[in-house]
Image: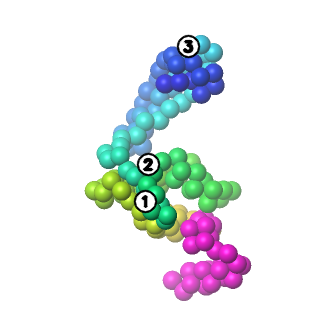
Amino acid sequence: MKCPFCGHENTAVKDSRAIEGDTAIRRRRHCLDCSARFTTVEHIQLLPLKVIKKDKSVEAFQREKLHRSLHLALHKRPIDEEKIEKVINSLVRQLESMGETEISSATIGSLVMESLYDLDPVAYVRFASVYEDFTHPEDFKEFVRQLSKH
């Protein structure tokens, strides 16, 4: 594991522990060159997932993109990091359990929408504005109007 601070290739593990219901391992590491400390998290990956994008191109699934998207939608919302990680883990498990190695970005977006609907209504609308490609303020009004009917 390379040090994220100096790029040195030799790091040592100081502590390891199971997290997230024993589905991941958190490791505290330190660099043998600059002595910086950092944490890594390892997750089980059952299948190497690929995402089929709207333009039909295919790219490797990146958990970090999912994490970034949720954080953006949940910015300044009262949801703690542990809850966000649980949602991400649940979403990844759902994707892996589909039995497919290639999953459309629309499927992933729908699953994220379902999760956000239950987690935080404001984050749900924020994510929907990007996912549904809102272009006018009226798009928000219509979406919220439809939401309040349900």
Q: Which SS does the magenta portion mostly show?
A: helix
Q: Which of 69 and 78 is in front in this view?
A: 69
Residue 126, above or below 62: below
User: Does label 2 or label 3 sit earlier along the sequence?
Assistant: 3
Q: Marks 1 and 3: which is nearer the front? A: 1
Of the numbered discs in the image, which one, if any, rests on residue 60?
2
Q: Identify the residue under disc 3.
A: 32
**Label 2: how many Cα within 10 Å (few below 14, some 14–19, many 20+):** few
The three-letter amino acid code for the residue at tag 3 is Leu
Tell me where the magenta segment starts and ends, as one range: 123-150
Give how far apart the Cα atoms at labels 1 and 2 are.
9 Å
For image coordinates 47% across by 35% down, the residue present is: 41
Residue positioned 49% across, 24% down in the render: 1
Residue 131: within the magenta?
Answer: yes
Q: Which amino acid does label 1 sit on?
A: Ile
Vertical position of residue 21 compared to residue 97: above or below: above
Q: Where is residue 103 in the image (x, y as percent from the top left)?
A: 38, 59
Q: How far apart are marks 1 and 3 (CA)?
A: 40 Å
Type of amino acid under label 2 = Ala
